[in-house]
Image (cartoon, helix red, strand yellow):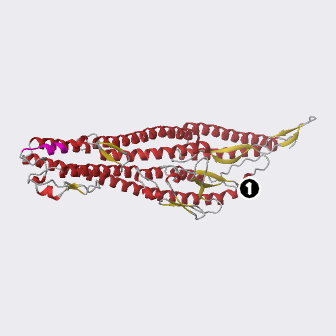
């Protein structure tokens, strides 16, 4: 019994050293969970030592399970915070691109172009017969129209980029669902044979960590034997899992399975349609899109009135269209009430294509003939009252009803409201992105403190196992010396 007890200790601590060495080797491997050999006692033997009562002798140790060290609750907390941070960080980045295009306040923004245009009309009212002053008015009008064009086309380009990014995210989500299902199958093949496939568990967790960046989901374990345990046994195998998304609310959940561990089905996203693991298709409304990066992208680029998702870029484009339309329509109307340098009523086509900020431009007649700029009210030479009236449109209240803000105000105040709303939304997204990042980082730090490899701790365990191994080897030597004495050193008298 002595040799066998020592042999068991020798073998067990050899395996423990092997597990420690594997931890050290994977210290820099992202997503690796440290593993520890669980050591337990072997069966005890009842022995009578000559007294009235028998005792029990231990027969050594054995390695029971090589399990990874992981806290699934902390994992879920980390993924929950990852979903939130990904949502707000994506919106913050998109608003940042919008702010770069709007570029207010600046010397090149829309507000500055409007101010310069109004100023050129005031200068024309002082010198209505000055060809140079008329040329400046036309140039300022062209610059204003081009500013509308640039902002609209740039916002549309970013909107298209966000839509393309959403398509990429959908492909990644579908790919991750396929990978999780594949790992599920491999785990289901390994566990019934008594194995704990720690590498597969780690791979599945890495895929779920990445999936949490894109959509919110729930990890639902699928129990073997209906979750039963026998006697004092404890379940060590993690088993297969379902991936479920909630299209409803916490109070009224509408759970849809995307990875079916038992049936093997895999769901997928196809634009704003969701196919579950059983093949049923659900068109997604705004409220039903799972939280995360995908939802943030959709909320920024928008999916139009049919889907009920008016994205931030869609709203800004509508606001620019409303501004261009109300401004140009009011200006054209006022201009047609003046008299131009040829003595006829001013054209009502000073600006054309006025319903779209992307297309608004100065009319061909004005581009060809400066005399058609109507600066007079009575047609007399030197009368600039008409140009002054045009400049006074700067403070005239216009009825804005087709944008995000319904109000009667000047174009300048309306634009300030639009910029203010954008700034508030961008600031909120930025603040929430920072706070959720801090919570995510804190959760990850707690997770790493549990699962990550600590070289200091591994070195300590290595020394502990090494000493235990050496002690077991010394025990074998001691037992060997005892047996040698008995076999070779006893019973030699008389030989």
Residue tagged by mark 1?
225
View extreme (bottom): residue: 279
SS state under label 1:
helix
**Horizontal and vertical percent for residue 244?**
59, 54
Left or right: where 396 falls relative to 458: left
The N terminus lies in which quarter of the figure? top right
Left or right: where 399 falls relative to 257: left
Residue 293 visible in the picture = yes
Left or right: where 396 falls relative to 368: right
What range of the chain is rendered magenta? Answer: 382-390
The C terminus lies in which quarter of the figure? top right
View extreme (top): residue: 51
- Report the predominant secondary structure element of the magenta stretch: helix
**Image point (59%, 40%), residue name:** 450
Q: Closest to the observer: 83 or 48?
A: 83
378 w.r.t. 51: above or below: below
Q: Closest to the observer: 296 or 119?
A: 119
10 Å neighbourhood of mark 1: few (<14), some, or many (≥20)? few
Q: Is residue 107 magenta?
A: no
**Horizontal and vertical percent for residue 343?**
9, 53
**Image point (61%, 43%), residue name:** 73
């Amino acid at each position: 019994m002595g040799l066998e007890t020592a042999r068991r200790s020798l073998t067990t601590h050899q395996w423990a050293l092997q597990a420690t060495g594997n931890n050290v080797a994977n210290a820099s491997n992202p997503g690796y969970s440290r593993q520890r050999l669980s050591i337990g006692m072997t069966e005890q033997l009842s022995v009578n030592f000559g007294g009235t009562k028998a005792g029990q002798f231990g027969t050594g140790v054995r390695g029971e399970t090589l399990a990874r060290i992981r806290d699934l609750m902390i994992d879920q907390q980390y993924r929950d915070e990852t979903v939130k941070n990904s949502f707000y960080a994506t919106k913050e980045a998109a608003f940042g691109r919008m702010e770069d295009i709007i570029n207010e306040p600046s010397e090149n923004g829309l507000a500055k172009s409007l101010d310069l245009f109004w100023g050129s009309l005031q200068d024309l009212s002082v010198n209505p017969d000055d060809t140079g002053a008329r040329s400046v008015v036309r140039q300022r009008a062209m610059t204003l129209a081009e500013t509308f064009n640039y902002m609209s086309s740039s916002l549309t380009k970013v909107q298209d980029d966000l839509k393309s990014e959403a398509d990429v995210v959908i492909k990644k989500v579908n790919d991750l669902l396929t990978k999780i299902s594949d790992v599920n199958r491999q785990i289901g093949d390994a566990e019934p044979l008594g194995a704990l496939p720690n590498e597969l568990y780690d791979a599945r967790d890495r895929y779920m960590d990445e999936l949490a960046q894109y959509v919110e989901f729930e990890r639902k374990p699928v129990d073997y034997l209906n979750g039963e345990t026998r006697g004092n046994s404890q379940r060590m195998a993690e088993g297969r899992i379902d991936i479920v998304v909630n299209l409803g609310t916490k109070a009224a959940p509408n759970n849809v399975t995307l990875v079916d561990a038992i049936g093997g089905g895999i769901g997928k996203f196809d634009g704003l349609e969701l196919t579950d693991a059983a093949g049923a298709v659900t068109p997604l409304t705004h409220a039903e899109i799972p939280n995360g990066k995908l939802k943030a992208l959709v909320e920024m680029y928008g999916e139009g009135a049919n889907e009920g998702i008016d994205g931030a870029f869609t709203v800004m484009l509508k606001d620019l269209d409303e501004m261009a339309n109300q401004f140009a329509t009011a200006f054209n109307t006022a201009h047609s009430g003046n008299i131009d340098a040829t003595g006829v009523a001013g054209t009502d086509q000073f600006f054309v294509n006025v319903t779209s900020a992307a297309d608004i431009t100065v009319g061909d007649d004005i581009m060809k003939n400066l005399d058609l700029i109507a600066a007079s009210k009575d047609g007399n030479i030197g009368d600039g009252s008409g140009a002054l009236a045009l400049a006074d449109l700067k403070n005239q209240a216009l009825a804005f009803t087709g944008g995000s803000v319904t109000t009667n105000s000047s174009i300048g105040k309306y634009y300030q409201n639009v910029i203010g709303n954008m700034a508030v939304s961008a600031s909120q997204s930025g603040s929430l992105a920072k706070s959720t990042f801090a919570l995510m980082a804190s959760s990850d730090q707690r997770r790493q403190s549990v699962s990550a490899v600590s070289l200091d701790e591994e070195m300590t365990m290595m020394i502990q196992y090494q000493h235990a191994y050496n002690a077991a080897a010394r025990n074998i030597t001691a037992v060997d010396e005892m047996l040698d004495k008995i076999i070779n050193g006893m019973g030699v008298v008389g030989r």
